Image: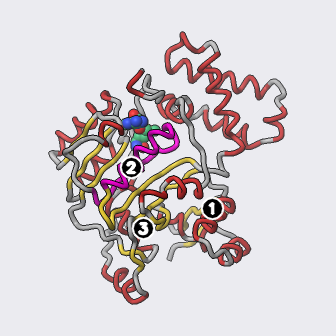
């Protein structure tokens, strides 16, 4: 479809909620990095590519502020607007493409611009449009949340995506409808693996990944694997893409993702402590963790808290237990083979 820029629209995206994008969680992640979040109590918030709109609707219904968003798939915008009508929250949801949104005259300046699961699946031109929106519409001190697939974690399974994409373009899936296409593509990759492929033999992770794919739903798989664009880069590439936006990296939006003591070996921590440049350090951290997905927080003009401000801010932070204390896990999963003990 011409309006979709090669983005897969035959199946709508799955319904997911992503708590890391919640303004309260963004504030907490900044606090964890000793950065003043500068996020007011009633933020103006923009989500780009909201999918079914579950996250933006929950955030608007559960927190104060004004919530704006777009997703060019009209069927998804209809569903998202139904949720908005039910909550009555302050939501402005459009079916504009990023390009159309960029030329709107009715947009306010934003305290937060967030995009989850979008950056890796759109063209370079659309990524440029997004960075332009951030440059012009994120106010000084504002937060950008961007999640994306990254290297090196994806490197060994890139060929699987290529086979699925080839099946879509040149295989027999065309007459099978979108779900049949996915099923056929997975079957095709499986056939290659079973035919004694040395790629699969020498990359056991590829076989594990294929098995994992067969357990996923077609709506997720289509959006992950069958778009015309699939952009994989390192953290350092992301920083380069954001050069004109005046954004600085703050840390991971995933609260445990930024705690090296829980995730890295002693040797890994020692190596990182010797790397002075923040972009190099963060990229090497991805190699140590073999990370394949990142959810990053950037701020336009971050301010580092002093030690005493940081301590006071933690003391002032309120928490609410949302489940009985007996149900709180005593161990925190921290990555392959590692877990931290909560106290
Ligand atoms: C993988 S989905 C993620 C959806 C949602 N953020 C989530 O995580 O549940 C990517 C979304 O971006 C939307 N999208 C892709 N390209 C777009 C564009 N150029 N303009 C507006 N929306 C776009 C798609 O319609 C799709 O819903």
Marks 3 and 2 in Cβ contact (< 8 Å): no
Name the residue nearer the viewer: 228 or 287: 228
Dot 1 or dot 3: first in sequence order is 3
Q: Which residue is mark 1?
A: 283
Q: Is the residue marked by circle 1 packed among few (<14), some (14-19), or many (20+) residues within 10 Å?
A: some
Does the residue at mark 1 contact the one at mark 3 (Cβ under 8 Å)? no
- The residue lying furthest to the front in this view is 244
Q: Which residue is mark 3?
A: 29
Q: Is residue 202 magenta?
A: no
- Measured Cα–Cα span from mark 3 to mark 2: 25 Å
Of all residues, the one furthest to the left in this rendering is 88
The first of marks 3 and 2 along the sequence is 3
Residue 227: percent from left, percent from top = 52, 30
Q: Which residue is mark 2?
A: 132
Residue 14 appears anywhere in the view:
no
Q: Quick check: 54 above or below 305?
A: above
The magenta region covers 110-137
> What residue sits 41% from the left and 56% below the top?
145
């Amino acid at each position: 479809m011409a309006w979709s820029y090669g983005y897969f629209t035959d199946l709508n995206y799955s319904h997911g909620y992503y708590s890391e994008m919640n303004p309260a969680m963004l504030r907490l992640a900044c606090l964890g990095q000793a950065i003043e979040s500068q996020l007011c109590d009633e933020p103006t918030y923009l989500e780009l590519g909201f999918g079914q709109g579950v996250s933006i609707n929950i955030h608007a219904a559960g927190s104060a502020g004004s919530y704006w968003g777009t997703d060019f798939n009209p069927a998804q915008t209809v569903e998202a607007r139904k949720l908005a009508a039910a909550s009555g929250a302050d939501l402005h949801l459009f079916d504009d493409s990023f390009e159309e949104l960029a030329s709107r005259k009715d947009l306010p300046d934003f305290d937060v611009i967030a995009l989850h699961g979008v950056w890796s699946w759109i063209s370079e031109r659309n990524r440029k449009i997004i960075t332009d929106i951030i440059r012009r519409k994120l106010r000084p001190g504002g937060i950008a949340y961007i999640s994306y697939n990254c290297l090196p974690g994806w490197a060994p399974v890139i060929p699987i995506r290529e086979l699925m994409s080839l099946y879509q373009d040149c295989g027999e899936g065309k007459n099978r409808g979108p779900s049949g296409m996915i099923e056929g593509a997975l079957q095709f990759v499986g056939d290659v693996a079973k035919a004694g492929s040395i790629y699969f033999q020498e990359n056991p992770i590829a076989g594990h990944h294929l098995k994992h794919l067969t357990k996923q739903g077609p709506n997720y798989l289509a959006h992950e694997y069958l778009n015309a664009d699939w952009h994989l880069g390192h953290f350092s590439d992301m920083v380069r893409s954001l050069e004109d936006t005046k954004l600085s990296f703050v840390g991971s939006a995933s609260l445990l993702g930024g705690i090296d003591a829980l995730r890295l070996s002693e040797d890994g921590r020692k190596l990182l402590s010797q790397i002075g440049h923040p972009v190099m350090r963060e990229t090497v951290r991805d190699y140590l963790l073999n990370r394949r997905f990142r959810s990053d927080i950037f701020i336009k003009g971050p301010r580092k808290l002093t030690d005493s401000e940081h301590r006071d801010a933690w003391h002032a932070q309120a928490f609410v237990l949302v489940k009985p204390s007996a149900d709180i896990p005593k161990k925190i999963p921290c990555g392959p083979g590692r877990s931290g003990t909560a106290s």
